[in-house]
Image (cartoon, rainbow, N blue to C red):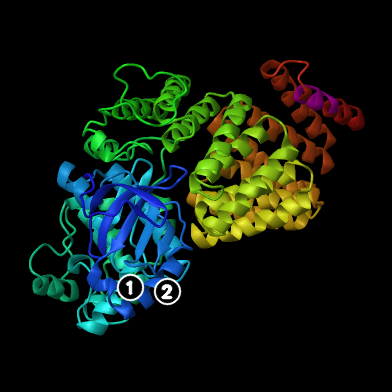
Amino acid sequence: MKPLTDGDPAMVGGFVLRARLGAGGMGQVFLGHSPAGRAVAVKIVHPHYAQDPEFRRRFRQEVTVARAVSGAFTAPVVAAGPDDDPPWLATVYVPGPNLAEAVAAGGPLPEASLWPLLGGLVEALQAIHAVHIVHRDLKPANVLLAQDGPRVIDFGIARAVDQTALTGTGKVIGTFGFMSPEQVQGGTVEPPSDVFALGAVIAFASTGTGPFGEGGAAALMHRVISAEPQLDSVPRPLRDLVADCLRKDPDQRPTLPGLAGAIANQWAPPDHFPGPLWPAEVTRLIRSRKEPAPGIPAAMVQPNGAVTHPPTVPVTAAPQPGLTIAELARRHQEALQLGATADFAESARLMAGVAADRAQVLGPEHPHTLESRHFHAFGVWAAGDRAQAGALMAGVAAGRARVLGPDHPDTLLSSHIHAHGVFEAGDVAQAVGLMGGVAAGRARVLGPEHPSTLLSRHLHACFVGVAGDVAQAAGLMAGVAAGRARVLGPGNPDTLLSRYEHACFVGASGDRPQAAWLMAGVVGDRARVLGPDHHDTLLSRFAHACFVGETGDPAQAAWLLGGVAGDRARVQGPDHPETLESRHWHAYYVMKAGDLAQAAWLMAGVAGDRARVLGPDHPDTLQSCHWYAHCAQAAR
C-alpha cells in the first residue's frame, strides 16, 4: 500500500481514494472507501483499453454479469463505471496478500492450508460459473488470502481484455503456466478450463512452482500441451485430485461438484471454528494489509499498523496510549487461536476487550469492530450461553446490515448465528422467521445451492418441524437433501444428515412406510460412508427399526432393535442412555409380537438398569416400569 501521487484521482464513482494498492494487466488499483466507510479496491482501466470501443462494449457486458457473482470466496463487484472516462470497477477490498506473494514470503503452504485453499477456490468457481462466467485467468496473483479463506478476484473481466486482444492483435491474455491446453491453442474456453487452472494453482501453492516449471512462453506452452505435470512434491492426498484437474482432455477433468464431494470425503474442517488457516508468515502479511480506517490517510499508517497522528474517526472514549491498529489485530488473532483450541470462555473474554478497544479507535460500527463483536458473540455461544450469544449477535447483525448492507455475506453469517441462538433460547417461532430470512438472503446473494445457503435451509426446515409443521418440514428438507446431493455429493455426511432428517419428518407426518424405506437407504449409505459402528449409523438403524415397527411388523422391528441394542452396548457401553433406549424398544416390540413372558423379562432388566443409571424417578425409568408391569400382568 503506497500513498497517492499528484496525478492520481481523489475520487472515483463516489469512492474516496486513499492509497495505491498496485497495478495489473487491466489497470491501476487503488484502495477506496464508500461514504459509509466500506473499503473497496477500485480498478481504473488502462488508457489503451479505455480508448478501444470494442473493449468498452465487452467490459460493459462482463461487468453486468460479474455483479451477479457474490460467493463467500470471491471479492464481489460492488460498483462500476463502464461508460466513464476512464472506465472503472470497484470490488470488496480483501486485506491479504495474493498467493504468489504469500509463497514468495513464506514458502509453499503446508497441507493443512492447502485443503481450505482448494475448498474455497472450488466454491468460488462454482459461484462464478453459476452466472455463466468462465474466469479465464485463475492464477496465484488472482487469489487473495484473507484471514477466513481465499478470495478469487478479476473473474469475468479477463474475457473483455482477452477478446479485445484477440480482435486487435491475435494475442491471448493469460499466464501460460496456468492456462489450459485448449486456451493456449486458442480453442473454446469453458468451465473445465478453470478446473485446469485450479489444479495448477494448487500445485503452485504446495510446491512453490507451477506444475509445468518455469521458462519462456514458448517452452511453457509446449509443456502445457504435451508434457505431464510435475507433481511429485504435492502431498499424496491432494496429488490425485490435482492430477485429475490437469488432464489434457477437458472432458476428463472433474466437475466442481465432483471436486467438492472428493474434498468432503478426504478432509473435514476443524471441529472448532474459527481456526488459523495459514502459516504464521502469511498471517503476518494479512495483518499488515489491514486497510486504514475511514478518514485516516494511507501516509499516516506505518508498516506496523501504528497511526502517526490521531485518527479523525469518531471515538467513544480516549484510546489507550500506544494502542495501534496492528496491536488490535494481533490481539484479535490471539483470541481466535484460543477459540481454535476450544478455550471458548477465555476467547470470548479476550475478544470482548478487543471489540471495546476497536470501538474506541475505529468506531463502534467499523467493519473490524463488528468482526471482533461477531467473534465475541460466537465465543459466548460456543461456551454455552446461547441466550446471551443470541442477544449479542443480534446487535452485530444489525450493525453489519447498516454498514455492509443486509445482503453482505458477513451480515448473513451473523444473522444465521443469531437465528440459531434464538432457537436454542427456546423461541422457536421467531427462529423460524429469522432463519427463513437468512436462507432467502443467502439464496439471493450466494445462490440457492451454495453450501452456506443449504445449511441455512436445512436449519430452517428443522425449526419448522420443531414448531409443529412436520409436513412442510419434510417438503423443505427434501429440497435440501437433493441440493446437497448435487453440490456436495450423495455420500457427503451433510447430505446424509439432511436425508435422515427428511425421513424423520416424513415419518412424523404419518407416512411410516415411506419413512422406513427412506431411512433404510440412509442406513446403508451411512454404514458405507461412516462405518457400521458410527454413532450416526446406529442412530439411523434405531429410527429405521422403529418405523418398521410402526408399519405393523413388530417381529421384524424387534429383531432389528435387538441388533441395534447389542451394537450400541458394544460401541457406546451397556449403561449408555441410547443403549438403554434401544433395549427398551426391543422389549416393547417383543411384546407387540406376542411374546409377553420374554418381553416382561427384557423390560425388567431395562427398568432395573435405568433406575441404577438414571434414577428411580426418571421419566424413562418410570416408562420401562410401566411396560414391565403391563407385560408381567398380561403374561399371567
Using residue 32 as the reference point, say whether residue 553 is left or right of it.
right
Residue under label 2: 61
User: Residue at the location (28% across, 82% down)?
Assistant: 187
Is 624 within the magenta? yes
Note whether residue 403 is visible: yes
Q: Position of residue 110 (x, y in %)?
A: 24, 43
Residue under label 1: 159
Q: CA distance from mark 2 to mark 1?
A: 10 Å
Locate the C terminus and report the quarter of the image it occupies. top right
* The residue stretch that appears in magenta: 620-626
User: Residue at the location (66% across, 43% down)?
Assistant: 434
User: Residue at the location (80% across, 52% down)?
Assistant: 551
Are the two marked residues, 2 and 1, in contact with CB atoms closer than 8 angstroms?
A: no
Q: Position of residue 329 (x, y in %)?
A: 33, 30
Task: Work out whether 228 lies above or below 119.
Answer: below
> What crowding class fits label 1: few (fewer than 14 Cα within 10 Å), some (14-19), or many (20 or more)?
many
Q: Tag 1: residue type? A: Arg
- SS assignment for the magenta stretch, majority: helix
Q: Earlier in the sequence, mark 2 or mark 1?
A: 2
Give residue 585's quadrant in the image. Answer: top right
Task: Work out whether 250 lies above or below 117.
Answer: below
User: Residue at the location (37% across, 70% down)?
Assistant: 134
Comparing labels 2 and 1, the label whose residue is closer to the camera? 2
